């Protein structure tokens, strides 16, 4: 039975196993991620958070020795089917990385890139999309006069918001964030957190974080992973106030990790 | 070993290093100064814009200069697209594995093959088989072959210097492998690739042996005016003059060496500047 307050599933894994060569990295993980909510993945480093996040936009395809078993679905459709075009999938499922990785080009070119490779060349259309994406990423006011400046000249926090804008410009349905604020100062971090909360009106956010307070502040649901297994998954409030598993409790109370 | 002998050895090694370094610099310096002092008296506009002559004081290097310029441009035209394409293919598209490493080792060893061998290859393939004879085209194609491995190695190194995160950033936005390479990786590595190409080309314009093998002329009285023209280049002209019995011609040769060195230095300087500006612009 689907409870009435549970929104429809956006992303889903069923009995997912991931291997890098002989290494069994994700072990039998089944979870559903609801639409237009923020879902946080937490757990000690090396437990497979990034790996499972990168399953949703097939970013692991490039890793030597990568194999998987089980299903991964977007909107109920298996995304590892042969007929799925990876490029199309990634237009719907955007990603922001741990370390800001702007292209060594102008701010404008960074944000316009995703549209340009889709064949959008109309200057007016690009201009409008770039401006909107920068607004959405709360960066517009800071860069509106410097759109031609090289993106590498921005501060770390600005670079990360630029990367968010770049991902938003192609109008994805989902945005995956792998510790997006871990390399940033507290002020930049809080800007990004605010931004994430604003984003969930329009899209689904999945965020990996090793910062428990951050997970508690911004996420609706939290999944706790340990050594490749999904230990506990539920509403963030439940996970943080009365975890069902001893392991979860130990982790969120800082006893290890 | 006691601390004292250790220190002594260290001191000796430092001395050895210093002597060898300075030896290199001094030998080069003496050579350059000698050439310069001998040749500078012959440098003049007439020398730069004149034709070779039986009389050393009247001899000029215009045909050889223009030949070298042609060779430079044509070789660049051949080697740039081929070298970049090969590097991109090997670095970005080929599966890393046994075949890739075999090719890698082969290219690295190709860079060590003596240039005469390339001359013979060029003679057989371009001069005879293609029927290009001893024209600029045959010479440039041969030299392009000669520097091709160097260009590929340099370009691959530049491509490899582009961090993985740039590629991932492009893929994550829905770029195909080709789009990521074309729009992000190549522009980001362009400075490095260009530097490698210029250095390789500056080696090409100093080559003599392969061009002599394909039958480049040693004496010409015309300026090559098309890629199908017969030609000579500065190093051959220099070689020709130094092998004359009259010491007067050696002075002419020295002047030509100054010109050739000047060209090479200019190219190397451009390469260093490019590399510097590229490094400064890109900080990941
Ligand atoms: N490219 C890779 N090749 C092989 N093993 C990897 C690779 N990336 C990650 N791993 C391994 O997979 C496990 C999970 O890594 P990861 O998903 O990055 O964890 P997390 O993001 O939770 O720190 C770790 O044991 C890590 O060493
Ligand atoms: Mg990680």
Image: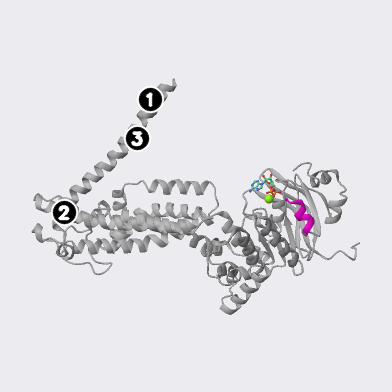
Find the distance from the CA under tag 3 to the CA under tag 2.
33 Å
What segment is highlighted magenta in the picture? Answer: A210-217
Q: Is mark 2 within 8 Å of ligand 1?
A: no
Residue located at (67% from left, 68% from top): A138
Badge 2 vs badge 1, beta-carbon distance below 8 Å: no
Depth check: give the residue in front, B115 or B56.
Answer: B56
Magenta highlight: main SS: helix
Depth check: give the residue in front, B172 or B83.
Answer: B172
- Residue B249 lies in the magenta-colored region: no
Q: Give the residue number, with chain letter if any, for mark 3.
A: B17
Find the distance from the CA under tag 1 to the CA under tag 3.
14 Å
User: Is residue B112 something that shows in the picture?
Assistant: yes
Residue located at (52% from left, 46% from top): B98
> For the residue labelled by badge 1, is the local secondary structure a helix, a strand or a loop?
helix
Q: Where residue B8 is drawn, which disc sits there? A: 1
Q: Chain of mark 2?
A: B
Mark 3: few, some, or many residues within 10 Å (few <14, many ≥20)? few
> For the residue labelled by badge 3, is the local secondary structure a helix, a strand or a loop?
helix
Q: Is residue B185 left or right of residue A156?
A: left
Type of colouring: one colour
Q: Give the residue number, with chain letter if any, for mark 2.
A: B39
Depth check: give the residue in front, B58 or A256.
Answer: A256
Number of disc labels = 3
């Amino acid at each position: 039975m689907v409870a009435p307050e549970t929104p429809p599933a956006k992303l889903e894994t069923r009995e997912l196993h991931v291997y890098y060569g002989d290494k069994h990295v994700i072990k039998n993980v089944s979870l559903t991620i609801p639409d237009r909510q923020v879902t946080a993945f937490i757990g000690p480093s090396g437990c497979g958070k990034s790996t499972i996040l990168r399953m949703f936009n097939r970013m692991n395809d490039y890793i030597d020795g990568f194999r998987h078993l089980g299903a991964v679905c977007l909107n109920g459709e298996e995304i590892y089917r042969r007929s799925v075009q990876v490029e199309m999938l990634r237009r719907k499922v955007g990603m922001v990385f741990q370390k800001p990785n702007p292209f060594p080009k102008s701010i404008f070119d960074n944000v316009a890139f995703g549209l340009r490779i889709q064949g959008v060349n109309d200057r007016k259309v690009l201009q409008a999309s770039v401006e909107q994406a920068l607004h959405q990423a709360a960066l517009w006011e800071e860069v509106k006069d410097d759109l031609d400046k090289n993106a590498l000249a921005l501060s770390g926090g600005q670079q990360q918001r630029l990367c968010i804008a770049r991902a938003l410009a192609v109008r994805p349905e989902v945005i995956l964030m792998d510790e997006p604020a871990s390399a940033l100062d507290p002020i930049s971090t809080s800007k990004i957190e605010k931004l994430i909360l604003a984003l969930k009106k329009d899209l689904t956010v999945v965020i990996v974080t090793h910062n428990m307070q951050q997970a508690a502040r911004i996420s609706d649901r939290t999944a706790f992973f340990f050594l490749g297994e999904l230990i506990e998954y539920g509403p963030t409030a439940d996970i943080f106030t009365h975890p069902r598993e001893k392991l979860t409790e130990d982790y969120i109370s800082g006893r290890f990790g | 070993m006691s601390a004292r002998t250790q220190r002594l050895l260290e001191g000796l090694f430092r001395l050895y290093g210093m002597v060898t370094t300075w030896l290199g610099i001094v030998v080069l310096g003496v050579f350059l100064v000698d050439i310069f002092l001998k040749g500078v008296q012959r440098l003049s506009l007439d020398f730069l814009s004149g034709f070779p002559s039986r009389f050393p004081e009247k001899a000029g290097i215009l045909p050889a200069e223009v030949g070298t310029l042609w060779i430079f441009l044509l070789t660049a035209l051949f080697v740039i697209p081929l070298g970049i394409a090969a590097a991109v293919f090997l670095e970005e598209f080929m599966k890393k594995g046994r075949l890739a490493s075999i090719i890698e080792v082969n290219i690295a060893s190709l860079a060590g093959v003596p240039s005469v061998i390339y001359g013979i290859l060029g003679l057989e393939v371009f001069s005879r088989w293609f029927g290009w004879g001893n024209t600029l085209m045959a010479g440039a194609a041969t030299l392009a072959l000669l520097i091709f491995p160097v260009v590929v190695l340099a370009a691959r190194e530049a491509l490899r210097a582009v961090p993985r995160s740039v590629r991932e950033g492009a893929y994550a936005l829905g770029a195909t492998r080709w789009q990521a390479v074309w729009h992000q990786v190549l522009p980001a590595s362009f400075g490095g690739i260009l530097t490698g190409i210029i250095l390789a080309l500056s080696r090409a314009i100093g080559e003599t042996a392969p061009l002599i093998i394909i039958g480049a002329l040693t004496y010409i009285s015309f300026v090559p005016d098309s890629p199908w023209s017969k030609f000579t280049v500065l190093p051959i002209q220099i070689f020709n003059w130094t092998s004359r019995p009259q010491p007067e011609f050696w002075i002419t040769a020295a002047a030509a060496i100054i010109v050739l060195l000047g060209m090479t230095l200019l190219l190397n300087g451009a390469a260093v500047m490019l590399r510097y500006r590229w490094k400064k612009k890109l900080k990941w």
